Amino acid sequence: MGGLTGAVPPELGALSNLRRLYLGGSFTGGIPPELGRLRNLRELYLGSLTGGIPSELGSLSNLEVLSLSGDLTGEIPPELGQLSNLRTLSLADSQLTGAIPPELGQLWNLKTLQLRNNQLTGEIPAELGQLGRLEFIWLGGNQLTGEIPPRWGALPDLLNMDLSWNRLEGCIPPGLEEFVVSTPDSNPDLMACSPARDVGALFDQIVASLRRVPVVDDDSQR
């Protein structure tokens, strides 16, 4: 919709059969809560808008892509965790504050989580470790603290991760060393920790070595 300017019309919420909505950087103002009525919407891209993210967007049950950018403020609505078909959640390069809602751990089909360059605080919810289909995790440029969810180290499809410029601490989960970097200014309290040795495997190794020791017949020594 190049060349169009002004606020996003709330009347767009009446387009009940709309499947894709792309509104670029020429629009201003806030996100109309009425967009939450677009129950058939599959993809929503909004840029250069201001204000908060309406909780009504959590009603878009068929949504697969949600990409919002601009100077958005306020917290991420926990209602977004209801978007069970979502594959991409991008809320980058804004002024979002508060904690990452643990409800986002219900987005079972999510492949891309993009929340970088905001002002998010608190710990990364452990519930996000349940998102086994993640391929891209971009949370850099926030003020996140605490540890990295250990289960992220076992993500089978992970391709890229950016957690830089936060205040994370603790051990980097095995399998994520190539993605996570610790510097004096970026996650200085993160460390690469060697995984604990499997006690069962160690016991089997000891038993196997004992079996290789020659048995001395006491009678032969007499």
Image (cartoon, rainbow, N blue to C red):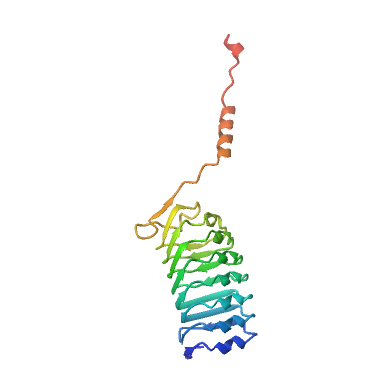
x, y percentage for residue 64? 60, 74
Which of 144 and 92 lies nearest the eye of the viewer? 144
Where residue 118 sits, quadrant-wise, is: bottom left
Specify whether 73 is left or right of 42: left
Q: Is residue 43 above or below residue 87?
A: below
Q: Position of residue 25 (x, y in %)?
A: 46, 83
Q: In the picture, residue 143 is in which quadrant?
A: bottom left
Of the pair 135 and 107, the residue shown nearer to us: 107
Tell me residue 142's x, y (percent). 42, 66
Q: In which quarter of the view is residue 189 placed?
A: bottom left
Q: Position of residue 12 (x, y in %)?
A: 58, 87
Asked if residue 95 is positioned above or below residue 121 in the image, the reply reads: below
The tally of labels here is 0
Q: Is residue 88 above or below residue 219?
A: below
Q: In the rendered view of the protein, which quadrant contains the C terminus?
A: top right
Q: Residue at x 51, y 82 (%)?
A: 31
**What residue is shown at x 47% (from left), y 77% (from top)?**
69
Q: Residue at x 61, y 82 (%)?
A: 37
